[in-house]
Amino acid sequence: MTAPVPATAPVFETVVGDLAVVVGAAHLRPGAPADAVAGVQPRLVLEPGTGGELARVLRVAAGAGLAVVPRGGGTKRAWGAPPRAADLVLSTRRLDAVVEHAAGDLTVTVQAGCTIARLQQAVAAAGQRLALDPLRPEGATVGGVVAANDGGSLRGAFGSLRDQLIGIQVALPDGRLARAGGKVVKNVAGYDLPKLYCGSLGTLGVVVEATFRLYPLPRETRTLRFAPADVRIAAAQLLAIQASALRPTGVQLALGSAAAPELAVRLESASPGALAAQQAQLLALAAPLRQTAGAAPAPDPWLARERLLAGAEPAAPAPAAPPAAVCKLTFLPARLVSLVDGIAAAAAAADWHLVAQGAGIGWLRLEATSPGALLAAILRVRAGAALLGGSLVVAEAPAALAPELDVWGDPGDALHLMRALKQRFDPGGVLNPGRFVGGI
């Protein structure tokens, strides 16, 4: 893969003129500190109004050797490694339309810049929903959520984003618009390329449109909360719920170095009677636990990930706040107790809080007395997770850790395949250079 050659000032000015012709001068401006991507400020910010304009911007940028960073709502701009270069931020803000809602087919096609909240509002009018609950839905866009593969607590019941994405249109660095998948749920022709773009962090192409399968909105929803005596009881109960005939749409355990375990279970149904039957079955199954539902009002447990991330962004911590990082963990549900024990031992000198979801995804916040102590805690927890067959990726951390911290960790045997895909789709290294696994 060939890295972009930085454009000289005269060449860059010429490129700016070419880009202004494509998107219009009103939709092009100099980069500002608020546009920084993982601490790197871009030279220019562009907002194309159509997929065709977006593709032409990529072609011009690639021809001039400029590094391009795609951006949706900017809610995850701190994720990934700092880019080697960020000449242009390519914003999808103006691509925000719901293109087609085929309610009878339970599908929706939407542009990349549409927020998840707006999409949910649009399909809710027909009694439907996208069965995803990603972080910060009011600001997170469809394209950004696909690029980051951000699902949420609904994953255990409805599958991952990859399972619900059935079609995609992307702009490639050579200026082509490519489409894969389709607009019907049963679409098996050819390779399943939509899944390839999920979690690729905008390094293979820029999402222009996406088509998702939808599900009916539940008529009744109820969350029950329990206070297990310790993590072993909580983990055993979590596994028992998953092995039962119950079909909860969310199972989540929250605990920390100074926080007792709390188990939350969300039940949904099309009728009050069916929901009551589910609740009775859950209460019988969870008889050893103390139920906390109905006590004093408490924060919504399904917003626990957002609370972990609050204040952890590199540019956002309060002056007196301790250094903090938020990490995404994957783990085998049967090894949850060992994972928690490992976190407690590895982060003994740090404050920690874990939100673990039944599908084997966890979010861990670490706070330490110094950046060095925080780095040491992250590395110890990562090593322990790997020994248990899991992984740890740092989502947000202080900028001071960037020179020493590999946010992705060891990619294993898959790195050569990832590099081959990058070479195939972006041979010039135009898109998000250096932000992905292994410096891709």
Image (spheres, rainbow, N blue to C red):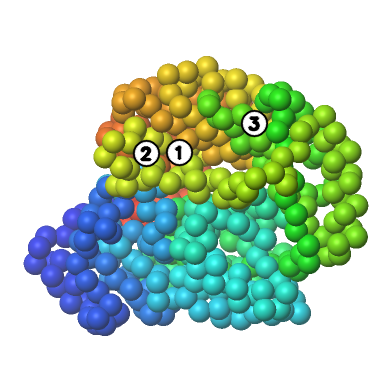
Q: How many marks?
A: 3
Callout 2 amino acid? Ala
Say whether residue 229 is left or right of residue 392.
right
Q: Circles 1 and 3: CB distance less than 8 Å?
A: no
Residue on which disc 3 sits: 261
Side (left or right) of 229 relative to 419: right
- First in sequence, mark 2 or 3: give its number: 3
Q: Secondary structure at mark 3?
A: strand
* Mark closer to the chain start, 2 or 1: 1
> Residue drawn at (75%, 54%), measured in percent from left and top?
222
C-alpha gap between disc 1 and disc 3: 19 Å
Identify the amino acid type marked 1: Val
Residue 241 or residue 435, whichever sits in front: 241
Quarter holding residue 75: bottom left
Q: Is residue 339 left or right of residue 207?
A: right
Whether residue 245 is visible, yes or no, is no
Between 162 and 294, the one lying in front of the other is 294
Residue 277 position in % (x across, y down): 90, 52
Query: Which residue is tagged 2?
Result: 397
Quadrant for the C terminus, please. top left
Pick the front one: 326 or 170 = 326
Of tags 1 and 3, the one toward the viewer is 3
Give the percent coordinates (x, y) of residue 186: 75, 68
What separation in Å lies between label 2 and label 3 (alpha carbons)?
25 Å
Which residue lies at the image location 14% right of the left edge and 73% below the top edge?
14
Measured as percent of width and height from the top left, residue 206 is found at 43, 64
- Residue corresponding to mark 1: 326
**Taking 268 as reference, is 399 above or below it?**
above
**Residue 69: in sight, yes or no?**
yes
